Image (cartoon, grey):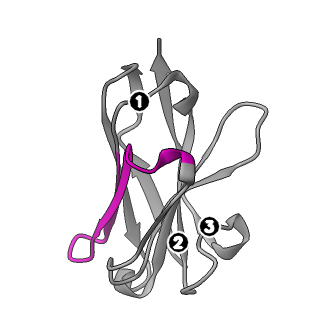
Amino acid sequence: QVQLVESGGGLVQAGNSLILSCAASGRTFSNLSMGWFRQAPGKEREFVAAISWRGDLTYYADSLKGRFTISRDNAKNTVYLQMNSLKPEDTAVYYCAASEGRYRLVYVSTYGYWGQGTQVTVSS
C-alpha cells in the first residue's frame, strides 16, 4: 500500500503561484512513477503532469506546458507541482497519484494509489 498526502492548496489571485506537495509513505518511493491530476466541478478528472521514478522524464498536459513544473525529491519521499501564472480555469481539486508502472502515465487508470486531494481556487 501507498499513502499519499497532498498539501499546499489554497485561494490565490490570478497571476500568482502555488506549490503543491505530496508526501508518500508505505512503499519505496523511488520505485514509483508519480502524477498530478485535477478535477473541476462537473468535469472529469484530467491529467496535469507526471514524472518518472528517477525524475529524469516529465510529462505535461499540452495546455499547461510552460506554466506548471513537476519535480520529486526521492530522499524526502515527496513530489511537487509548481504552478505559475495561475488562471481562474486552473481552479480544481488537485490529486497526487502513484503508479508502480513506467508507462501510460497520462491516464487515470494507470495509477493505483491516490491522495485525498487539495483544493486550489484562483480568483480573477
| SS assignment at label 3 | loop
Residue at (33, 84) in percent of width and height: 54
Figure check: 45 above or below 108? above
| SS assignment at label 2 | strand
Sequence-first tag of 2 and 3: 2
Give the label, 2 or 3, closer to the camera: 3
Task: Residue under label 2, please give it.
Answer: 98
Residue at (40, 19) in percent of width and height: 14
Q: Which mark is residue 72?
A: none
Q: Which mark is residue 86?
A: 1
Sequence-first tag of 2 and 1: 1
Residue at (79, 32) in percent of width and height: 42
Q: Is residue 31 visible?
A: yes
Callouts 2 and 3 close, C-beta under 8 Å? no
Q: Residues within 10 Å of mark 1 (few under 14, many from 20)?
A: many
Q: CA distance from mark 3 to mark 1?
A: 21 Å
Q: Which residues are magenta?
A: 63-82
